[in-house]
Image: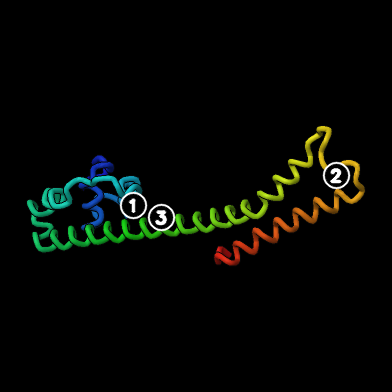
Amino acid sequence: MTTDQNTNDPRFVFACALDGAGGSHSVATQTAEPRWYHLDYSPPDTREALSGLGLDTGLIDSLTASRYVEDLDLVRERAMVLQEELLNRNVEQQNARMYVLAILSAIFLPITFITGLFGMNVAGLPGTRDGHAFAIVVAIMAAALAVVVALMRRKHWF
């Protein structure tokens, strides 16, 4: 192959991989990477590309070409399995993080409600004139927290 051929042509990539002609390995790798980066990309028919490259000229025989095709199919399948495995790991990590956030939200929601209720600036709130009102509110929040934690432990949520 000559260097003036279009390096984006998939046949050029296969030719570089098969016989090393037509350019350096880095050119073949640079050409192949954008095409295989997204695995949902549908490459051109490999058998057709290989037959156009070497079967007509006698560079490779049909048995060798079919082995190359099978190897490429296996590599593609392995890459897809690895991609699915990475996706599953990411989903599991995200689920674990969401679980922790849900637990924390359930623990602090009652406390936040009580704090917000007594933080309003309106007349007539109970305990505004009592000196022990703050201690009573803190005790109520601690009791609410204890109840929530006890319920979560009973259900084995953490």
Q: Earlier in the sequence, mark 2 or mark 1?
A: 1
- In the image, which disc is placed on residue 87? 3
Residue located beneath label 1 in the image: 29
Specify the quadrant that holds the C terminus.
bottom right
Say few, some or many: other residues with alpha carbon within 10 Å of mark 3 (under 14 / 14 to 19 / 20 or more): few
Say few, some or many: other residues with alpha carbon within 10 Å of mark 1 (under 14 / 14 to 19 / 20 or more): few
Say few, some or many: other residues with alpha carbon within 10 Å of mark 2 (under 14 / 14 to 19 / 20 or more): few
The residue under the point 67% across, 60% down is 147
Distance from label 3 to label 1 (Cα)? Answer: 25 Å
Q: Earlier in the sequence, mark 3 or mark 1?
A: 1
The answer to whether residue 22 shows anywhere in this view is yes
Q: How is the image coloured?
A: rainbow
Q: Earlier in the sequence, mark 2 or mark 3?
A: 3
User: Residue 33 location in percent, x, y?
Assistant: 34, 49
Element type where label 1 sits in the image: helix
The residue under the point 13% across, 48% down is 48
Judged from this view, the residue extending furthest toward the top is: 122
The residue under the point 35% across, 52% down is 26
The answer to whether residue 19 shows anywhere in this view is no
